Amino acid sequence: MSLARGAPATSLAARLRASLAHVRQRTRPYEQLARIDKPAGTYLLYLPCTWSILMAASSTAIPASPVLTAKMLALFGTGAFIMRGAGCTINDLWDRDFDRQVERTKDRPLASGAVSVPQAVAFLAVQCSAGLAVLTQLNWTSIGLGASSLAFVVSYPLMKRITYYPQLVLGLTFNWGALLGFTAMTNTLPLDQALPLYGGGIAWTLVYDTLYAHQDKRDDIQVGVKSTALAFADRTKPILTGLALTSGGLFAMSGAAAGLGVPYAMGVTAATANMLYLTWTANLDDPASCGRAFRLSSWGGVFLGMGLSIEYARRLSEEQTKRQQEPPAVPVAATERAGDGEPDAVPNPRTP
């Protein structure tokens, strides 16, 4: 009897597992197309957003509320996840013929045929629609600024064909959030803070993506793909050292303009040290070593974000202390009589 009762349940569970496996098999290529299984790029896109949000929250006369700051961090995190995936889809649509000839990328869904071009275009439409839904949660200034970044998103894959510096265009694209966070928080763009922060992010991107490009330099030469790895060649480490120091200097300029203190300075120092360490410890002729350096590069951005987070927490604490120390409101000595608008007489303490 128990076996008879258990059989339908077992059959149902088996059918459910089979259905889930089928769905997983169908969605897996799209997960790979959006690089969901490789989140490093999402972190690198999101981190500049956190910098500008936290800097804007910290540098106003009264620190931004934690609720607003958390809301913006969540919105930008969602947007970074979606738009990084959309950027990968665009990249693979442009590069599918190149990817088939490169060992590291030949199994990507478009290159291998697991996803067709029409299917990828339809998937891209869904991604962009989702990204637009996030963008429209911001103010109009931010919507316009965010939409203007699409030119860089679409053109970046083409740059590999026409210039040895596509990493510069990637830097312009991936660090757009360093501008957008300011407008989202304050509806203004303080150029003395935003531009050095943006420039520091671009230099940071040139460091980590040049290390990334060294993975494929042999295949890139054969298929005609250009990169800073090929442009810098044997001079890569000295040039990246200069870029790391430039990045740190620009980050420091931005913090000085915002009036930030020691916690932020420590974050800048740690971020710069991370770039220098990865540059000089990476074996540029070993793809595995270059890939490891790229994946660890996000820690530089995390260190900068930690400095800003501590700075923001300090500003909030100072503001709370200031409010607690403010004297209580002075009571009104006289009140108006109801109906005639004249003040009541104030009792004379000497009168018996």
Image (tube, rainbow, N blue to C red):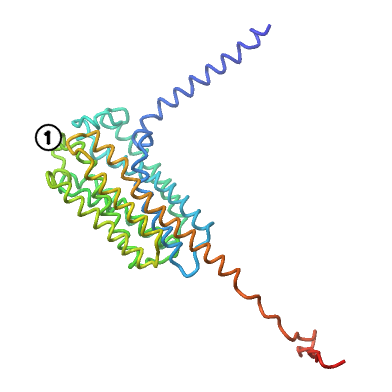
Tell me which residue sits at (67%, 80%) in the image: 330
Establish if 13 lies above or below 302. above
Establish if 227 lies above or below 197. above
* Residue 298 place in picture, x, y as percent: 34, 45
* Residue 265 place in picture, x, y as percent: 36, 59
Q: Which is more toward the observer, 151 or 79?
A: 79
Q: Which is more toward the observer, 190 or 266?
A: 266
Identity, as a three-letter code, of the amino acid under mark 1: Gln
Tell me the residue that label 1 is attached to: 222
Q: Which is more toward the observer, 4 or 244?
A: 244
Q: Tell how many labels.
A: 1
Residue 208 relative to residue 256: left or right: left
* Residue 66 place in picture, x, y as percent: 52, 57
Tell me which residue sits at (22%, 40%) in the image: 282
Q: Quadrant of the C terminus?
A: bottom right
Establish if 204 lies above or below 289. below
Q: Quadrant of residue 230?
A: top left
Q: How many residues crowd around disc 1 within 10 Å: few (fewer than 14), some, or many (20 or more)?
A: few
Q: Secondary structure at mark 1?
A: helix
Q: Quadrant of residue 250?
A: bottom left
List the single residue furthest toward the bottom: 351
Residue 140 relative to residue 272: left or right: right
Tell me which residue sits at (39%, 56%) in the image: 51
